[in-house]
Image (tube, rainbow, N blue to C red):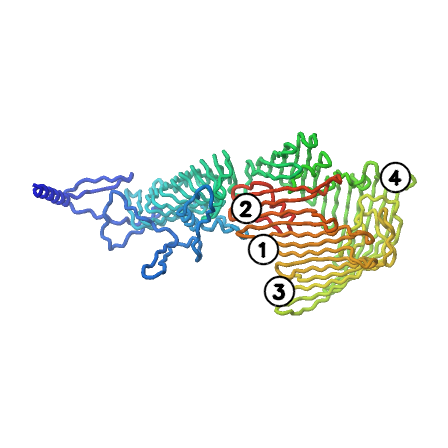
Amino acid sequence: MHFRFFFVFFLCLFARSVIAEDNVWDCEKNKAGEWSCVSQGQKEPVETQPAPDMPVPQPLAESEPAAEKARPVFMKPPRTVAKRPGWTCSANEQDETWNCSLIGADPKGRARVVEHAEHDAGLLDPAYDFSEEEIFKALQAQLPYDPWQNCLGPSVSQPALVGDKDLRNTAPMDVHADYSEVFDKEITSFFGNVDITRADQHVQADMASYDTVSETMDAQGHVFYSENEISLYSETALLNLATDEARLREALFISPSGPIRGSADVVYRDSKVLSRYTEASFTSCRPGNQDWVVHADRLKMNRATGQASAKHAWLEFKGLPVLYTPYISFPLDDRRLSGILPPSFGSTEKNGFDLEVPYYWNIAPNYDATITPRYMTKRGGMLRTQFRYLTEISRGNIGLEYMPYDSLREESRYSASVQAQSNFGYGVSSNLDLNYVSDDDYFNDLNNALGFSDTRHVRSLADLRYNQSWMSFVARLENYQTIDRSIPPGARPYQKYPQLQLNLHHEMDDFPLNLAMENQYTYFYRSGRVSGQRLNLKPSISFPWQTAGAFFTPKFSLQHTQYALEDQLPGRAEDISRTLPIVSVDGGLFFERDFDFGDSSYLHTLEPRAFYLYIPHEDQSDIPLFDTSLYDLNFFSLFRDNRFNGPDRVQDANQVTLALTSRLIDSDSGRERLKLSVGEIFYFRDREVLLRGNTPETNSLSNLIAELSGQLTDHLSFSSSVQWNPDVNDITRGQGTIRYRNQPEQIINLGYRYRRDNPNLEATIIQSDMSFRWPLYDNWFAVGRWQYSLKFNQTVESFLGLEKESCCWRFRVIGRRFVNNISNSEEAKAENGVFVQLELKGLASFGDKVDNFLEKNLYGYRKPEN
């Protein structure tokens, strides 16, 4: 019974196969991609031929070799796996070697050790797994340049690559695939290792269908799409090559302008400049690094405005969730955009925790404003507003700070400032700088400790200038608000209402003769003190003669000063005039010789110089001191024609300065390896013209001044100076600095200062100064500075901190101990502060501006460019 059953079954099966051989199906695929099949009876099989080449603008397809006679028609296209760019390695079974082959360009363009993804242990799993990181590297390799090439090194300008729409419309489409099929002369399907290029557009996929009428492409299976401004990967992609619209699911992307890379459930590309992402995550870290990642429900990037925004976003840093925001916007390039800027925060003993949240308002291309609410836990809230403008002839900013109520002082406080510069053309320009604070302790209390303004006077001025090649004119108003109560009223600066200055000069073309004239008129005013007008005229004539080995310049000047004083002390004249001739002769020689030391060639110079000055004596004790004081004594002041820096005093002089300078110059690089200068003044008479309260100077020699500096190596330099007082046979001033700088990472500065203003008294300043930036480990750096007073055995100022430099983020933290130099009382004491800054490159910077502080207070430190 069983045998009969199986016999009947096999007989039916055999009969059915015979019928199938006798009935051939005729199948055809329509535009919608669906198959229609009908029976043709005993017809011969239809042979499917490879798709023929089509002329431009239709795509050109490469068919298989002619040896393959026929290809069967499938109800479903075969899912072949396209070969991806990169290295493929497999173990050799015969020995312990590897068999490796490279498809396309190496993503890094060079041989390298296989890298592991840079994932640190954290609470959260990595946002991108290993396979996705490998896809990111493949996307990076398809871009025309490496977006992370400026990661940690010096900034390199990136090429401006913008897709040309007209070029895309006219460029041919080059297609490579294992085989292809054409339907209705409109739809072309490509299968296996599909590679399509048109202008800057490049598509790779397992299979793709292209409609030449609508210019749409449906790509499936390991889809890679790249152009100059973006690179994407997806399993499925629908692209409209005519409108630059696209829709991709489960996509990975790289936007090189940020650079930014990320993933999204769905990518909607509305145009070439606008794209939207759902359930997205993104970072500016290079492939293989996920130090920080932002996750968002919605992400939008608009290259037309240069702005990106995310909704319901939270920040993951080092595997830890650290911040949530319902909305955040950030720039894609350097254009200015309105929005909330990253907050700044710090902490000091005087103000407590200090928080600032600025809002930037981009009013117009040439106008903007920054509105910054600030809150201090010990004082309360305040508001700062800064408005900036730019026109064709002027630029400036207006600032205002207001605190309605200071909890510690129990009063309101404010400050205002206006800065404006204008250039009207034809040599006419103006400058306006107005400043005011509500009280003397304003900077001491409310200025941020990292942006501390060390000043004793708040200066305001307005001037109008006119400049030509042969003359210059300045009209100025100048006012001072003294905020240091330790300065007595008699020592506070005068207001100038106004000051007019006209300088003329002319050089003869065919004869060594220079003519010059300095003219100045000023009205000085100060409440409760002598005020008045001053006119100072100073014509001069000089005969400069110079050759390659010598110079000689005799000069004659005549200085006339006229005063019309008010509120003069009883018994003193109100109208005073003074006229003095000034004669000087300046000359020097220049010797040089070449010599070799080891393998290096040097140029050695010897430059002796002599300067003679004669000014007759005239009693000037009845002339008030409006704006005059002594110049600080240094090597360059040995050659001045007046040791006072204002017209109220003209020194009496019969003296000669002798000096010698020698240089050692590297013949190959031109660097000044060593420079030594020594000079001294020999007095032929006593100096009787003095500032108020000083006694005549009777010494016949000035301090012997020596300065030594040099660039010993490409990284090591030093400078030093010393002043020897021959009357007390002792050093009255000295300073020395050694600086080491090896690239931006290694900085060491060592300094020492010594000063004794009165040779008969103790030193005024004995101070050491040390600062550094030094690498520790894995791009962690230590930064610090220590200024110490050896006279008082106490720290003047110090800070110590850490700085981390990464490809996609920076972190800085410093602790600072400082003393307010503008304190108005003797109760000033040292303050402590801690300041933190976290900068996520391409996104935002959080915390205080520690980088600005380091650039100002750490010699050789420069803010990174990227």
**Residue at 67% from the left image edge and 60% from the top image edge:** 710
Q: Identity of the amino acid at label 2?
A: Arg
Q: CA distance from mark 1 to mark 2?
A: 18 Å
Does residue 289 lie above or below 530 as drawn?
Answer: below
Mark 2 / mark 3, whichever is N-terminal: 3
Q: CA distance from mark 2 to mark 4?
A: 62 Å
* Residue that badge 1 annotates: 743
Residue 233 in the figure: left or right of residue 378: left
Q: Identity of the amino acid at label 1?
A: Gln
Which labelled disc corresponds to residue 568? 4
Q: Is residue 612 visible?
A: no
Does residue 675 lie above or below 131 as drawn?
Answer: below
Quick one: which residue is furthest to the right in this view? 571
Q: Is residue 387 visible?
A: yes
Mark 1 / mark 3, whichever is N-terminal: 3
Q: Secondary structure at mark 2?
A: strand
Of residues 379 and 467, the one drawn nearer to the viewer in this rendering: 379
Judge the density around disc 3: few (<14), some (14-19), many (≥20) Cα neighbours within 10 Å. few
